[in-house]
Image (cartoon, rainbow, N blue to C red):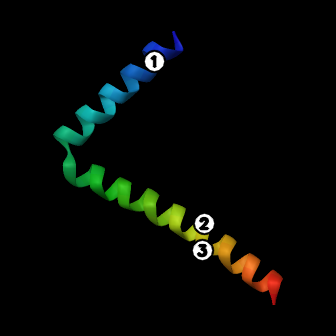
Amino acid sequence: MKKAIGWIVLILVIFYIGTSPGPAAEMARSIGDGIAEAFRGIGTFFHDLAT
């Protein structure tokens, strides 16, 4: 059952990207920015910890 739900979600994501590439790209950019900001914060923490 878990595998089937995974495939359905993947198909829906591909369908969304195919039918709405602009909003999908903006969403991917936002997620990437969030991840980059999190790593930047971790880097700042360890830099401040080391100094």
* Callout 2: SS: helix
Q: How far across and how far down the image is residue 13, in percent?
A: 32, 34
Q: Earlier in the sequence, mark 3 or mark 1?
A: 1
Distance between mark 2 and mark 3 Cα atoms: 5 Å
- For image coordinates 81% across by 84% down, the residue present is 50
Residue of label 1 = 5
In the image, what residue occupies the spot 46% across and 66% down?
A: 33
List the single residue furthest toward the top.
1
Q: Residue furthest left?
A: 19
Asked if residue 19 is positioned above or below residue 40 in the image, the reply reads above
The kind of residue tagged 3 is Arg
| Whether label 2 touches label 3, CB < 8 Å | yes
Q: Secondary structure at mark 3?
A: helix
Against 23, residue 13 (above or below) is above
Q: Quadrant of the rendered structure where residue 30 is?
A: bottom left
Dot 1, crowdedness within 10 Å: few (<14), some or many (≥20)?
few
43 or 16, nearer to the observer: 43
Q: Which residue is mark 2?
A: 38
The residue at 37%/61% (across/down) is: 29
Residue 1 vs residue 30: left or right?
right
How many numbered callouts? 3
